[in-house]
Amino acid sequence: MIPLSPGPFVRCRSTSTLLMLCWIFAGFTCTGSEHAATSTLPAAFTDLLPHFLVEPEDEYIVKNKPVTLTCRSTPATQIYFKCNGEWVHQDDHLIERTIDPATALPIMQVKIDITRQQVEKVFGLDEYWCQCVAWSTTGTQKSQKAFIRIAYLRKNFEEEPQGKEVTLDQEVLLRCHPPEGVPPPEVEWQRNEDVLDPASDPNFFVTADHNLIIKQARLADTGNYTCAAKNIVARRKSPSATVVVYVDGGWSEWSKWSACGADCSMWRSRECTQPAPSTGGKDCQGLDLQSLNCTSLECPQTASGAEDVALYVGMVAVALCLTLLLIVVVLVYRRRKEGLDADVADSSILTTGFQPMGIKPTKPENSHLLTIQPDLTSTSTSYQGTLRSRHDTVGKFSMANGPLLDPLPNGSHTLHNGKLGADPGEFVSRLTAQGYFKTLPRDVDNTSYGTFNFLGGRLTLPNTGISLLIPPEAIPRGKIYEIYLTVQRKEDIRLPLAGCQTLLSPVVSCGPPGVVLTRPVILSMDHCSDACPENWAVRLKKQNYEGTWEDVLLMGEEHPSDPYYCQLEAETCRVFSEQMGRFALVGESLHMGAAKRLRLVLFSDAYCTTLEYNIRVYCMDDTQDVFKEVMQMERQLGGRLIDEPHLLLFKDSYHNLRLSIHDMPQAHWRSKLLAGYQEIPFYHIWNGSQRYLHCTFTLERLSLATCQLSCQLCVWQVEGEGQSFGLDFNIAKDTRAMDSEFLLMDSSSTALAGPSAFQIPYLIRQKICSSLDTPCPNGADWRMLAQRLKLDRHMSFFASNVSPTSVILDLWEAQHFHSGNINQLATVMADIGKQEAMIFLVSDGEC
């Protein structure tokens, strides 16, 4: 706009011309539209600058409702708005003129409306602002800038509060990161739908970042806590987080000692009532009844002196008889044990069940290896019969430091091809009836069990990647154990996680705990870390008898004397343990580059008879047990896989996972999702305790005749990696089996006992161990075997065992149960120069 010079008369040529304004000076006027925001000042006020009585203020557009900006100034000849540097057309101004009765100064007020469309035009470039400019004959004045923003409040909380179980007086922290919104939402906390007011209850404190702290948990603080966020657009509530405040029991004071009884003893007692355990708290530990022998003076006198002498003589005689009986029992037991060892020494027992194996070394000069012809007349696949001493008639056996298990019916423990004929439910019920095993789930489908002796064996949970290898000689000779293996449902286990910790594996139990083992067993289970040791601090956790989870191993800081050792492979963890119990692998990310492997799986309804069609996207830990569980659940729901599973690395970056669907044929399909994408909060995935995280996309076909669906489904972490699924299939004709291609069905036996559980025959194993355990100057011993099998990074662990070769072969067995090639092992032995160790070679023709 160009200012006009003073003159006798100034006329606005056209009020319809955009941004055409008139400068008015003393004695001048401007003619034009009656809506022009101009006026003429009296001569007495021509030397005054305008000042603002009302300036425009920041506004928020809610949904599609426009906002009104107001500007009022005195004295002023003109007032116009400028928005984002451009003048607003004068026809868009609503003008009102009044006179100040106190000063007689003219007051001019101008209003304009701003719509959502105007603001969205500059989205991404700059914030939308408006400013008021007022003129007088002396000069101009500008008002403050008013910013206009589109108000919104997203649906999903960036971090939701998680339920906790805490002891009395413990501090509780409930985190809440509200949804993104403009203006920023206000946050309040509710307990059981009642708003918490920290001002009236100082035990509550809300931090600046909206987290709730309960300073000292009280019983009254038990309840469902909800984080609520609201702004001018909407109000959102997080899922409720249940806080349970439990009380562990305490013992009362001991009562006074009772009077001395007829048995010359006195008693006192105490009760678990101060406080009594409540809301899931632990019972009291220790004795509630205590006895003490009375002094001779306090004992009631019930016999004469001669009678006392006779009593003492009788007691001495009974003691001598018991001592002699104990000596006889020990001698008989030792003789029976020798008989059992003699039976085992008979090599026909160990080789009867071996199927012949052909081993073809790769080098032609290995043809001179010693060959022993096996007994090919046997048709059984393992030793059948009782594995006890021939003369043993004792019906029960003991386990040091552990509970007693009842024997199998008729007092014998018979193995038939390594399988048990007992009812699985009966076995689990019998275990859960005993103290520690009350936590053992009664989920027979996810439990394997068997009876084993010193020959060892293997337990497997099919299609889960979980197995337990019991090496030969791990169970002491003369002992027979009933052993179980089960995977726990994560929701049934209270596994405390803090900070950046995440659950990397299933929670697996093997037992019974407390049994005596002479060598470590190997527990194999999947994990979902990126297997980069520099990114993680990985800990092996074990639950003790009191139910508390303890760190028993930090990977990378193992000591040879530890009863535990872990080998972390690309997708599997091998745990060497001299004790049985409940284990889990927990990782703590060391920086934001640490990532978990997620398996993304798509399901839909196998049959659709309505216009709506659902696609479910599961985002689960990349472990076989979770995949199997989801497959079983979808099979019950009548679902089917609609694409091959994809892997996604989910980083510890605090960013959520987003899912969206695109490129649908608009003429036939439409999405019923209101937003452009769905989100799964970061902590729901990183915590690892929620097994079935998924989002559902509900699509609608415009006609029942439409059956062909093609679209693109994208899953990505904000500022991270992503995967996309290209879908193109017929929802009516695609009737393939849900798990025919993507779920490898493991049909192997869940329990194998004795030689049938191993790739390497027992006698060959013994020969290899005796040949390689002795150190050789040229290194042709167990160290070279570990190097050739690419296990040399565990040298210190192998060396800490009595037989390093035996532990190496145990690990080889655990790794190669399904894919083991004993020919490969024979070739390695030949390369080492220990041909004499491979004594069980036959040709393919002999097989």
Image (spheres, rainbow, N blue to C red):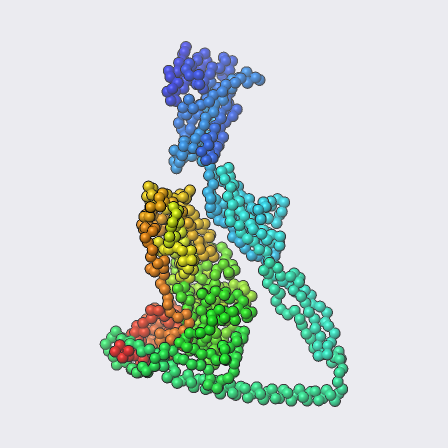
Reply above or below: 605 against 573. Answer: above
Q: Is residue 671 visible?
A: yes
Task: Identify the residue at image location x=55%, y=18%.
Answer: 100
Say which of 560 and 159 sits in front. 159
Residue 124 x, y percent position in the rendering: 39, 37
Which quadrant would residue 738 be assigned to in this image?
Answer: bottom left
Reply above or below: 540 against 473. Answer: above
Residue 343 x, y percent position in the rendering: 42, 85
Task: Identify the residue at image location x=36%, y=77%.
Answer: 381
Reply above or below: 769 against 171. Answer: below
Residue 51 x, y percent position in the rendering: 50, 23
| The N terminus, quarter of image | top left
Which quadrant would residue 803 be assigned to in this image?
Answer: bottom left
| The C terminus, quarter of image | bottom left
**Total marks in image:** 0
Residue extending farthest to the left is 364
Residue extending farthest to the top is 8
Task: Identify the residue at image location x=62%, y=47%.
Answer: 202
Left or right: residue 160 compared with residue 790: right
Reply above or below: 754 against 194. Answer: below
Residue 717 x, y percent position in the rendering: 40, 49
Q: Is residue 527 visible?
A: no
Task: Identify the residue at image location x=64%, y=87%.
Answer: 318
